[in-house]
Structure formats: C-alpha cells, structure tokens
Amino acid sequence: MSAFRERLAASLEARRAQHLYRQRLVLESPQGPLVRLGGRELLNFCSNDYLGLAAHPRLVEALQQGARDYGVGSGASHLVCGHSRAHQQLEEALAAFTGRPRALLFGSGFAANTAALAVLLQPGDTVLQDRLNHASLLDGGLHSGARLSRFPHNDLDALARKLGRLSGPALVVVDGVFSMDGDVAPLAPLAALCQQHDAWLMVDDAHGFGVLGQRGAGSLEAAGLGGSEVPVLMATLGKALGCGGAFVAGSDELIEALIQFARNYVYSTAMPPALAVAGRAALQLLSDEPWRREYLLQLIARFRRGAAQLGLPLAEVGGPIQPLMIGDAARALALSEALRQRGVLVGAIRPPTVPAGTARLRITLTAGHSEQQVDQLLGALEQAGAARHAA
Ligand SMILES: *Cc1c(COP(=O)(O)O)cnc(C)c1O
C-alpha cells in the first residue's frame, strides 16, 4: 500500500510550498517571559500564560504536594476508579467560583468542547457557531449530527435572521474571547437574543477565564451573566491558570448527562490528580494576587501606546492577545523570523488556523513581563520594520 505514503508526502509538500509548514520549538526552560531555545534566551510574547502562573512557585509546590499525596497517574477513567478527592475538590471549587451548581473536569479543552456538543446535540437540532470559533467547537458541532450553521464573526443581525428561520432546538456557541483576534463576543446581547428565540447559549472562555471580570471569573463575570443566561460554560486550566485540563460548568442535569453519556469522558483516563491539586492552587492565586490582572492591563495599555507611535495598525482590542495583521503567510513568517533574530519570540499565525489572506503576528502579553520587556518588544518591532509589513 503506497497510497498512504504518497498521500502523506504530497500533503506535506503542498503545505511547505504554501509557506504553511509548522515547526515545533523545543523549549529548554519553564514557560515565562524569558524562555531558552537552542541554548539562547528569547523574550517570549507568544504564550497563553496570561497571568504568568505556569511556573509560579506555589503551583510547582502544589503539584509536588499533589504527587506526594496521590502519586502521578490517576490509573483509570473517572467512572472506574480514577476520580480522586483532588478532582472532586477542584470541581467543587470551580463550581463555586463560576457560580454554577456543578463543574466537570476534562483532560483538555478540546475534549470538553467535543463532549459537551456531542451530549447536547442530536440530529434535527441546529448548532449556530461564530465563524471564528475554536476548531474544537467546529469539530464537535460537525461530529454531533446536528446541522452546523456558521454566522459571520460577532454579527448579531445575521444570527437573529438565522434563529428566526429555525424551528427545532438551537444551540448558539461562541468563544468568549476569540483566540486569534483577541476580541470579545457581545455576550449580553447574544444572551438576550438566545432567550428571545428560546435557544441555549454555550460560551468557550478559554482565553477569558482568569483574565476578565472583577475576580478573574472570565467573560461572563465581565458581562454580568450567569447560568440562567448562559447554561453551558467551558473554560480551560492550561492558559491563564497555568496548569492544564479544562472544565464544563452548568446545571446538575448537564453535568450528570456528561458523566453518563460523553464518550470522551467515560472512556478516557482521568487527568493526574496532582494537576487537580495545582488547579486549586491556581484558583486561589486568582484571589490572592489580583494585582496580576491589573498589571497585565497596564502592560497592554503601554504596548498599545508604543505600537501607535510606531504606526502599527493594531485592532481595537483591549485584552492580552494583540494581533498584528500582515495578510500574506510568507511575510508573516519572515517578520516572525526577523523578530527572533532580535531576541523576541512571536508566533506567525497562518491559515488554516486563520482565514486565508489574514496571516498575522499573534502577540500575547502576560503579567510575567516587565515594562522594560514590553519596550524591548516595541524596539524589535521597529527594527524589524513591522509597520511596513502590516496590512
Ligand atoms: C486552547 C483552546 C481550546 C482547547 O483547550 P486545550 O485545553 O488547549 O485543549 C478550546 N477553545 C479555545 C477557544 C482555545 O483557545
């Protein structure tokens, strides 16, 4: 059978020719504002560790304590004998923190999203998704058997028209903060629209949880919305919380249905219990170190002021994801490389992660950065001629 080999070779070659080939970096240090790569220290502006918690001593200590108390492996799925007190306590803490009756842990956000969509939806339903939703939401929608309908990014009128034409059950799904554009969904009017049409709303808050809202409880806290307006909340623990894994929060009925019917929950090994211990320490840090959210906002403002002075056309977004639109994939890659030569690591995000012709530098700021490091980023952008390449 050479068909598979030929197909693999052809697809890899095509990807290379389109300047879309991906290469993994091999980090030799913890995640942080400075990372070591190939023996060289680089300023890191591409991580989702928005609060700078991924290598926080209290998380490291919690993980170690968790390993001493529970060992390393969970040994089984949650339904067999892999569900420990550490998981249970984190679920209870997440439910309390998000103000919902229950929360359920998953090994990843990808798994949590596909599980929720698979359990909620069936053929005959419609799932309406923002065009820029995360790949896991789109995949989950496709696999659910429901009719998948995508609406233009943040376009409430287009969504209203679609909802108006529907009869059967409808689930509207959006990212709270869009991962590659950094803008937020208009959650309050979205929730009102869903209630008007008797549709359920699900929010994926992978990039808002920990960062937005008075207590860092995320996009819904910032929008003043709760479980009655947004029945399904998914958020991850691997970004601002610096750990790994994810959860779905909602009603007792929703969580019980996931436990009973979500195949990628039932047939999957529970996350290591020590990671759940670390997750609880991260939640505690959100309230113990609120300065991280404040300081992050200051850094964002500083970066945006400096970028404006350099003539960089940043979009009107106020969060830690600050994309610089380039357009052409090869140019985005070249600019990312030019920054790397100046000691700054910024990812070039290319199709199919983003729509064709919208390749960009995805600059992310974290509370781990200093003001001086933000100024270094601005200096590198200037030297690399970023303003000339921007679209
Ligand atoms: C990262 C991300 C996910 C997936 O979460 P993982 O825990 O990394 O699998 C889901 N949704 C969005 C919007 C994300 O950015």
Image (spheres, grey):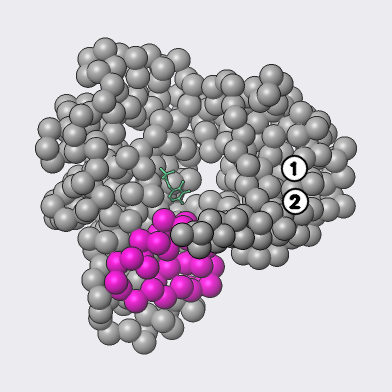
Under mark 2, the amino acid is Ala
Percent from the top left, x then y, of residue 217? 38, 41
Percent from the top left, x then y, of residue 378? 78, 36
> Between marks 1 and 2, how big is the CA–CA gap?
6 Å
Corner quadrant of residue 274 = top left
Q: Which mark is residue 336?
A: 1
Under mark 1, the amino acid is Ser
Does the rendering let one see residue 229? no
Above or below, 77 relative to 166:
above
Q: Which residues are magenta?
A: 128-156
Magenta highlight on residue 49? no
Corner quadrant of residue 43 = top right
Query: Are dots 1 and 2 in contact, CB under 8 Å?
Result: yes
Left or right, 98 with respect to 6, comes to: left
Does the rendering let one see residue 344? yes
For image coordinates 87% across by 52% down, the residue present is 388
Report the front residue among 217 and 381.
381
For image coordinates 49% across by 79% down, the residue present is 158
For image coordinates 84% across by 50% down, the residue present is 387
Q: Residue furthest front?
A: 1
Percent from the top left, x then y, of residue 18? 71, 59
Q: Residue furthest bottom?
A: 165
Report the front residue among 272 and 367.
272
Left or right, 81 with respect to 131, comes to: left
Q: Which residue is mark 2?
A: 332
For image coordinates 63% across by 42% down, the residue present is 23
